[in-house]
């Protein structure tokens, strides 16, 4: 794995788990020292994270962790909600139309749910949040719609930032399980319905976290 990717993942994990607070500066030199690598791959990693929407570029003074305002959160969920619902609907429809046997991607979704439960039991919030993000990525992959995947990819960085703010992960895990059951049953309408509830609950928690963030 390239050093720039190692650095990108390390910094992204620290942003998501709150080690780097929203609005705080991220110093290239300090990260390079911490990861025991040169500043060149760290610089590349920070640029990639700016593109993901996790960092903001400061003119002549480096980067800082993006601070999401309430209006930005509302806008993000306004866009994500219909996309997430359509992803679940298409994934369930694909399962319903598949030949006998488990369609590709369904086993991966179930495995991600198990990873999230294991991470929660171990108290590993970073890994749990990663599994939650991977679940939604898996639903999009199962939907098998390239345009939908492209649109979702543009939101992923900011969604990761929001998921990292969630202080009540248990309801999210439970709803992921319900989403999986509806998708696995090939019930598109039920999958869409539980996904709507899930996104609305996620919106509620995200707005609460943003409001409570100093």
Image (cartoon, helix red, strand yellow):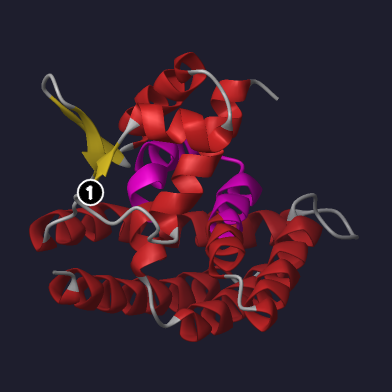
Q: Main secondary structure of the magenta part?
A: helix
Nearest the viewer among 35 and 161 is: 35
Nearest the viewer among 150 and 98 is: 150
Q: Position of residue 176 (x, y in %)?
A: 57, 74
In the picture, the quarter occupied by the C terminus is: bottom left
Q: Position of residue 123 (x, y in %)?
A: 61, 78
The segment highlighted magenta reads 134-159
Residue 124 quadrant: bottom right
Question: Residue at 57% across / 24% down in the picture?
Answer: 37
Q: Which residue is mark 1?
A: 24
Q: Position of residue 171 (x, y in %)?
A: 48, 85
- In the image, is residue 154 part of the stretch drawn in magenta? yes
Q: Residue furthest right?
A: 101
* Image-based side of 169 in relation to 24, left or right: right
Q: Is residue 8 visible?
A: no
* Image-based side of 57 in relation to 17, left or right: left
Q: Is residue 187 visible?
A: yes
Q: Is residue 166 above or below residue 158?
A: below
Q: Residues within 10 Å of mark 1 (few under 14, many from 20)?
A: some
Q: Residue furthest top?
A: 40
Q: Position of residue 39 (x, y in %)?
A: 45, 19
What is the number of callouts on the image? 1
* Image-based side of 103 in relation to 157, left or right: right
In the picture, the quarter occupied by the N terminus is: top right
Q: Is residue 33 above or below residue 172?
A: above
Q: Is residue 67 above or below residue 118?
A: above
Residue 164 quadrant: bottom left
Question: Residue at 38% across / 73% down in the picture?
Answer: 166
């Amino acid at each position: 794995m390239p050093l720039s990717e190692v650095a990108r993942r390390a910094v992204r994990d620290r942003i998501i788990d709150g080690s780097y607070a929203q609005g705080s500066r991220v110093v290239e030199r300090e990260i390079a020292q911490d990861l025991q690598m040169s500043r060149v791959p760290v610089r590349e990693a920070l640029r990639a994270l700016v593109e993901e929407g996790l960092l903001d570029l400061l003119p002549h003074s480096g980067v800082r962790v993006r601070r999401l305002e309430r209006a930005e959160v509302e806008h993000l969920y306004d866009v994500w909600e219909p996309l997430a619902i359509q992803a679940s609907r298409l994934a369930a429809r694909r399962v319903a139309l598949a030949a006998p046997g488990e369609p590709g991607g369904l086993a991966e979704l179930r495995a991600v749910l198990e990873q999230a439960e294991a991470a929660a039991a171990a108290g590993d919030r970073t890994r749990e949040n990663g599994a939650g993000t991977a679940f939604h990525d898996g639903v999009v992959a199962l939907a098998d719609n390239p345009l939908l995947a492209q649109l979702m990819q543009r939101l992923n960085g900011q969604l990761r930032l929001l998921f990292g703010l969630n202080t009540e992960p248990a309801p999210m895990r439970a709803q992921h399980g319900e989403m999986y059951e509806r998708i696995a049953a090939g019930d598109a309408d039920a999958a869409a319905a539980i996904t709507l509830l899930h996104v609305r609950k996620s919106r509620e928690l995200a707005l609460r976290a943003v409001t409570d963030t100093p």
